[in-house]
Amino acid sequence: MPLNPRGLSIKFVSSAAEIFKTMTTQEYIEQNKDRFLEELFDLLRIPSISADSAFKGDVARAADYVAEKMREAGADNVSVEPTAGHPIVYGEKIIDPSLQTVLVYGHYDVQPSSPDHLWETPPFEPTVRDGKIYARGACDDKGQFFMHLKAFESMMKTSGVPCNVKFMIEGEEEVGSANLGDYCKANKEKLKCDVILISDTAMISNDQPSLDIGLRGMSYVEVELTGPNIDLHSGVYGGAVGNPANILATMIASLHDENRHITIPGFYDDVVDLSDAERAEMAKAPFDLGEYKKNLDIEETYGEKGYSVIEQTGIRPTLDVNGIWSGYIGEGAKTVLPSKASAKISMRLVPNQDSDTITRLFTEHFERIAPASVKVKVTPHHGGNPYMTPMDHPAYKAAAAALEESFGVAPVPTRSGGSIPIVALFEDVLDTKTILMGFGLDTDAIHSPNEKYGLFNFYKGIETIPLFYKHYTS
């Protein structure tokens, strides 16, 4: 061994790979933080809007980018796999078939960015302000699934992964994952795993981590009322011919009573009501109603009577108008009685409601309450059933231990108001439980202008995910 001028032996490391192997995973993460962020920015610059066919090429480009980063991270058998819609990116690292296998799920598609004029900076030009990344998809779900690729890379470059890892990153979550079910059924053996790990949810705060143990389901429909066969002069015909816009407003208003209880017959038949003890446990989660209202700039909340905000957004079903349009909406005045009026309506569901059943009940009720002066068309878009994670599952315990080690505080179990339609299907088709270990915040404005994701959250996720694998395999 050669000597240095002081007579001490020098040990040469022959390659960059060997240098990395001398690092801990956390040291590798720290050394590569800037690169991780730049790579995320490159992904955020791709407008992978799955709902708009004009962006089909961008969605495909995002899939190719995800595959490229998956290969660079160390995954094998990486492929961009076509579906009847947008492609799925698959990759794996099988180190020993006898070990546990974790399937990481995420989505690279994003919501439309409109209304773009409300963004302080362009939605597909990621910008850091006040320690937060502003861009469409920053939190939902590009920033969150990308943490898993970077955590996987960090493990692969240092200590290695302690179990088998598979990735399935899709491009249709924001439009209901219409083709993922068929893909899972056709690839059951390839996707076989012991648990599914998802980061596409939020935690209570950066000081108080949490783990979602439940997701609400979804029934999403579009309704259209047609009155006269053309738009009419509102002076000549107004008062004699049914106005679809007025009628639609009346029908929608009737879907809730004075207590904001949904009036569709049979809607609550299968709802599982929590006991007083279970509701008392939920109430222990930190929640500041004043801060909640301040963040939203509202004077009062407006939910189902008799339930707290946490309960209204976690354990109770809802019905909300997501969009409504009719008649003339351009600049200035045009006095028409519109021929048509339309709305998009989503219903969030709780255990044990069934999406198909609720869609049917809604359709039958909406057609029944319409006056004869309009024709009704109800078009189902997508849906999914609710899901609950058992807290005694080994992977749930591993996620809780990882968060406690990373944050220094034990996580609180919560129930998310959001929906990931594919999760219930995973259990049906793959017979596998899902762990929801999200690092977003409710204030991240997902689906809204100025969506954001904290730099703290992005890096904290990358640091915490390897700890999940450590606890899961120990």
Image: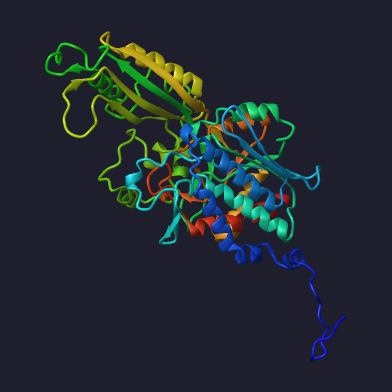
Apparent side of residue 115 relative to residue 220 in the rendered image (left or right): left
Residue at point 33% right, 23% down?
A: 342
295, 394: nearer the viewer: 295
Front-most of residues 211 and 3: 3
Q: Quadrant of residue 394?
A: top right
Q: Is residue 167 above or below residue 5?
A: above
Q: Quadrant of the N terminus?
A: bottom right
Residue 347 against residue 198 in the figure, above or below? above
Front residue of 92 and 431:
92
Work out which residue is located at the far left of the displayed protein and give it. Answer: 235
Q: Position of residue 382 (x, y in %)?
A: 49, 26
Q: Position of residue 128 (x, y in %)?
A: 44, 59
Residue 458 spot, x, y in % from top left: 53, 55
> Where in the figure is residue 384, as x and y percent of width and height?
52, 28
Is there any visible trace of residue 302 in the rendered image? yes
Colouring style: rainbow
Name the residue rendered at 48%, 38% in the picture.
Answer: 49
357 on left or right of 470: left
Name the residue located 72 percent from the left edge and 44 percent from the top edge: 92
Is 43 located above or below residue 26 in the figure?
above
The answer to which of 7 and 457 lies nearer the viewer is: 7
Q: Is residue 71 above or below residue 4?
A: above
Pick out the residue farthest to the bottom.
Answer: 6
Residue 349 in the figure: left or right of residue 259: right
Residue at the top extreme, as displayed: 372
Q: Is residue 216 visible?
A: no
Numbered-mark total:
0
